[in-house]
Image: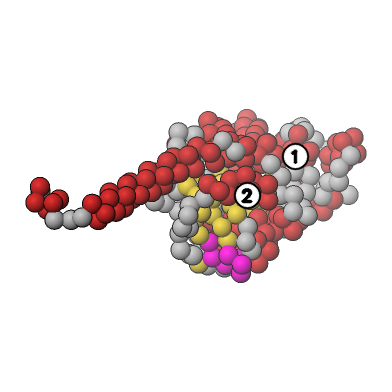
């Protein structure tokens, strides 16, 4: 009121004005920073590549509802180009449920738990987030994204443990992990023995490109409850040796050095499974009259100059 205004000194009035102005400015800066930070991080090459992978997987029909998830382990260059856009105050630390000391202090771009792959491209900073692992590799916190609440995929523990295994197996080159629910791979897990050799041979022999895409073969984890440390350990143990691993009656995990390699591996495994399933339907089950012979698989490896997993070939 007029009287109240009259009762304070000019200095007090000005101080109040500047306090309010500062508060408004701070709010404005923080809102502007939030908006800029979303856009700035979304413009990074690794985020664009990640968004494209999610969208391409949706287009392929591999992601019903919230099915599937993905993570990318940031390079030091990725980190320095977007660190200034991270939250001033990260979330508090959340236990991972297991320890992956080889991944200590790493940063991961991850899909949101319960998020739909079809929504990622529309709203990357709500569908995705960047998560930091602590110095022990046993807890994480959110440093960017997951706007409107949210947290990394329920399979985050599996992702971190598999990243640790794949980084060790590839001298640090492997950076992308992608989990999807492709229909033919899951269908095959209903009828084939759940072990790596049989699965690998079925896919290698169905299509010429298979042995080129996964010369070490693919692993198979029997049906397990997802989300916990047991399936994480079982998968990471196998992915020491394999870049891809089937989860029976569930889906497939693929890893790679970049988004193309990882998406391409998922695509190739699923396409080979599709061909195998169709051939089996046409044939009414049983052995196929025509498949690539073991000598042919060795000849492909010789022609293209890679090593094929001999344990999965017949002598
Ligand atoms: P999230 O939504 O938690 O990533 O789970 C999806 C999924 O495929 C679980 O296996
Ligand atoms: Zn799944």
Q: Secondary structure at mark 1?
A: helix
Tell which of 131 and 287 is nearer to you: 131
Residue 289, percent across and down?
A: 75, 33
Q: Residue at x 47, y 47 (%)?
A: 145
Q: Residue at x 72, y 35 (%)?
A: 206
Tell which of 138 and 15 is nearer to you: 15
Q: Say if residue 179 shows up in the picture.
A: no
Q: Residue at x 42, y 51 (%)?
A: 150
Contact, CB < 8 Å: mark 2 with mark 1?
A: no
Disc 1 Cβ-to-ligand 2 distance below 8 Å: no
Sort mark 2 into few (<14), some (14-19) or many (20+) by Cα contacts within 10 Å. Answer: some
| Horizontal side of residue 39 vs 257, given as left or right | left
Q: Which residue is mark 1?
A: 213
Q: Which residue is mark 2?
A: 79
The range drawn in magenta is 134-140
Q: Say if residue 140 shows up in the picture.
A: yes
Tell which of 164 and 39 is nearer to you: 39
| Horizontal side of residue 81 vs 174, given as left or right | left
Cα distance, mark 2 to mark 1?
30 Å
Residue 304, percent across and down?
A: 87, 36
Quarter holding residue 11: bottom left
Q: Residue furthest front?
A: 10
Q: Is 207 part of what is drawn in magenta? A: no
Looking at the picture, does residue 99 appear above or below residue 289?
Answer: below
């Amino acid at each position: 009121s007029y009287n109240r205004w009259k009762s304070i000194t000019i200095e007090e009035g000005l101080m109040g004005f500047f306090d309010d102005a500062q508060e408004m400015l701070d709010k404005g800066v923080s809102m502007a920073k939030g908006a800029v930070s979303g856009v700035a991080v979304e413009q990074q090459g690794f985020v664009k590549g990640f968004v494209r992978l999610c969208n391409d997987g949706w287009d392929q029909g591999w992601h019903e509802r919230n099915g599937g998830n993905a993570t990318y382990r940031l390079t030091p260059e990725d980190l320095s180009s977007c660190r200034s856009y991270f939250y001033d105050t990260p979330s508090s630390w959340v236990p991972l449920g297991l320890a992956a000391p080889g991944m200590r202090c790493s940063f991961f771009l991850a899909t949101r738990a319960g998020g739909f792959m079809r929504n990622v491209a529309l709203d990357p900073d709500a569908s995705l987030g960047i998560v930091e692992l602590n110095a022990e590799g046993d807890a994480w916190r959110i440093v960017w994204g997951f706007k409107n609440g949210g947290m990394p995929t329920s399979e985050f523990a599996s992702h971190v443990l598999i990243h640790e295994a794949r980084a060790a197996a590839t001298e640090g080159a492997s950076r992308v992990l992608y989990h999807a629910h492709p229909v033919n791979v899951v269908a095959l897990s209903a009828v084939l023995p759940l072990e790596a050799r049989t699965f690998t041979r079925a896919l290698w022999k169905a299509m010429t490109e298979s042995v080129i895409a996964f010369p070490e073969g693919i692993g198979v984890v029997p049906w397990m409850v997802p989300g916990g440390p047991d399936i994480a350990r079982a998968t990471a143990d196998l992915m020491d040796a394999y870049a891809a691993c089937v989860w029976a009656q569930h889906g497939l995990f693929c890893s790679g050095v970049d988004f193309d390699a990882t998406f391409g591996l998922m695509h190739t495994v699923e396409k080979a499974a599709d061909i195998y399933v169709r051939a089996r339907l046409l044939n009414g089950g049983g052995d196929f009259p025509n498949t690539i012979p073991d000598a042919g698989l060795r000849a492909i490896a010789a022609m293209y100059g890679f090593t094929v997993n001999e344990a999965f070939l017949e002598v």
